[in-house]
Image: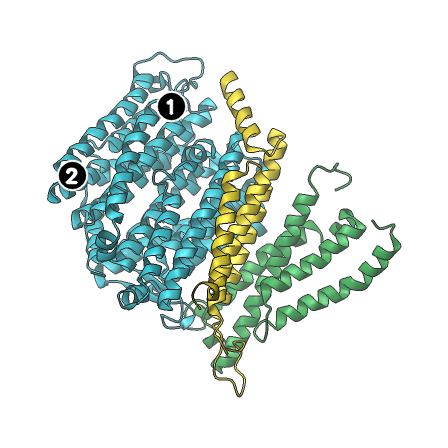
Amino acid sequence: MSAFGHYSYWITVLLMVAGLYIVIARGNLIKKLVGLSIFQTSVYLLYIAPGKLIGGTAPIIADGFRLYTNPLPHVLILTAIVVGVATLALGLAIAVRIREAYGSIEEDEILAADRDSEGGA
Amino acid sequence: MKRQMVLRVVGKLFIPYMLLFALYVQFHGDFGPGGGFQAGVIAAAAIIFYALIFGLPAARRLAPDPIVEAMVALGVLLFAGVGVAGIVLGGNYLDYFVLDGDPVAGQHRGIFWVEAGVGITVTGVMLKIFYMFAGRGRSLDER
Amino acid sequence: MTLAHLPALVVVVPLLAAPLVVLVRRAAAAWAIATAACAFSFAAAILLSAEVAAHGPMSYHLGNWPPPWGIEYRVDALSAFVLVLVSGIGTASALYAWRSAAAELSRDQLYLYYVMHCLCVAGLLGMTVTGDAFNLFVFMEIASLSSYVLIALGRDRRALLAAYQYLILGTIGATFYVIGVGLLYLATGTLNIADLAERLPQTASTRAVLAALAFITVGVSLKLALFPLHFWLPNAYAYAPSAVTALLAATATKVSVYVLLRFYFGVFGLRLVTETLPMAEILLVLSLIAIVTASLVALWQENLKRLFAYSSVAQIGYITLGVSMASPDGLTAAVVHLFNHGITKGALFLLLGGVALRAGGATMGSVQGLGRRMPLTSLAIVIAGLSLIGVPGTAGFVSKWYLVLGAIEAGRWWLAGFVVATSLIAVAYVWRFVEAAYLSEPGPATPGRGEAPAAMLAPALALAAACVFFGLQTSWTVGSARRAAELLLGGVP
């Protein structure tokens, strides 16, 4: 059972680390947001995968079923998804404004522009 | 894109069914997968689909800006209003048990109105985000 | 609207004010609704604080579902204290924003500023009052998202990049927190904070609990700007609108400290935090580095807002130093400094905003000879600066006193000396202001004679006066902090 049975956790860890790496390693503002989304998706998997009980049915009371999967993680993750969508929308809006203000969405170009304007001003 | 006949015809065929599906998802939230957020996104997707084919000004005539912004606020007020109704009727905040004589019927009623509020807000927010992003960088008469 | 519903109403009223302001688009009505909502929360927080002091903790069951199935709102000595701070600063900032935001934003966007202000205050209050770990995350994100928007409203285009960096780091922090809560939920099956505290000692999956402790620490540390996760703070505070800087500097990081305290001592317990994992030592080392490096960097800043932003990082180091002592005096120091630093930095940034309004910026050049041009503002900045240093008679002294007491009690005399020595660095950067304002001639960037508008000056002076008041009349702050510390330490062994 050991390592392969926990494959959902392995995928969670992989997504988590991949998302964090993209946020840190990529200088493009949009790519950072994509990495952030991947990181948040791994968290959804972390909550939902253990919620399913083996042999459990959908969590709606019906005759003949005694074991139901846990509905609470689904509710929590719906909320978390909404929060993630709002964060993504806000991040993209700020990126659009940065593009209009600086003309670029590469972080190193923006920081260079700031350094130049600060040195000159 | 509105000159493409296939897109125009198929779009006009699909959009009513998309809106109907959004309503289905909205009201079946306590029976199956669904609820306010998913329904709101599907409804907004229908109108965004319309905007993609027929252009942003046409969509803005269909769902004007003041109405969209009002939807955002009204949904939240509806949700919070259900909560305050719980207090006024003698229970705690967001207490659904007191909304009807029978506590179970009260739960149904509370969830119905709360999800309606969520659906309205989410539709408004998604449309507003689309209008904001798509309307940027265009000349004023095209907006 | 009886006292029993106040734990919910203190959050619901600002939350309801936000969509109301969206519907009412006029700037004046928007300001009125926002200020009224924050003032109601302030009054409610004071009432709750008095009630909790008299009768003990209050528990409110949302939706009438009993905990641990339902979400519980819990007001006890610690959360009531933080509620008063947050709602007070929220009201002061809303009053101040009438002139300050109007000067920095376009008139037809002004109502959106007040929407975000209401949401931020509602989110921070909700974080403080809730007793459910996931509900805390929801409110944390409400507060954070609205603060990203508020920061991005700054006039300088660098505010946009500051808001973006804060968004990335803040979302990573919140997601780490959610991972920690998820691991706790998987280990115990509950999300209610009080219930978690009961079930954690009995759980078998200790490794998951330790991982959860690590994740929650990192996540909350990103939010409270503990060194080395503080990089978003100087830019965010420097380029945001003045009212926003005051609001965030005085509340956002403090509520994150509250979350840290609640989880460390209220959920994980003293034994887990100090013996099983060396969290106290780690916090101690990071706090020391934060205090020294941030104070030193503050010395070299030209932009006054940036200078005091780095000073904030150092002061947060003092708060976490108190937390790391994990003793009654140490925790009292941490909680009392949470409040004292809140009002001190709130006063400072409101005053600097007045200078920025009159001078077009808040740099060392703008305050040359300020003592003659804006005497009240300069005097108040000096008073707040004295509170930062910890001069006896000001609020800052009370916190440092308890820090030194806690250090001596733990037998660490070098730590007591360290606290005193680093206060001297604060003397250096406050002296830079005094020298510029009182001992220099007015320069080209200094504003003309005349104070900031009354609507801006009044809340700022009130907070500066509070620095002195709570330095002399310490019974309420220290009493509340002591009760909070006893509550935290008496909880889980």
**Can you see residue C355?**
yes
Q: Are marks 2 and 1 in contact (CB under 8 Å)?
A: no
Q: Which chain carries label 2?
A: C
Q: How are the colours assigned in the image?
A: by chain
- Chain letter tied to green: B
Q: What residue is at 31 percent from the left and 55 percent from the top?
A: C263
Residue type at mark 1 is: Gln
- Horizontal side of C425 relative to C357 (left or right) equals left
Residue B83 horizontal/vertical position (percent): 48, 66
User: A26 or C386: which is nearer to us?
Assistant: A26
- Horizontal side of C428 relative to B135 (left or right) equals left
Image quadrant where residue C232 sits: top left
The colour with which the image depicts chain C is cyan
Work out which quarter of the rendered image holds the C terminus of chain B and state it. top right
Q: What residue is at 56 percent from the left and 74 percent from the top?
A: B30
Q: Which chain carries label 1?
A: C
Q: What residue is at 31 percent from the left and 39 percent from the top?
A: C316
Mark 2 or 1, nearer chain start: 1
SS of the residue under disc 2? helix
Q: How far apart are marks 2 and 1 (CA)?
A: 29 Å
Say above or below: C444 vs C39.
above
User: Dot 1 corresponds to which residue?
Assistant: C301
Residue B10 horizontal/vertical position (percent): 83, 60
Residue A66 horizontal/vertical position (percent): 48, 84
The colour with which the image depicts chain A is yellow
Residue type at mark 2 is: Val
Q: Residue C404 carries which label?
A: 2
Say above or below: A23 vs C299.
below
SS of the residue under disc 1? loop
Say above or below: C267 vs A110.
below
Q: Residue A4 carries which label?
A: none
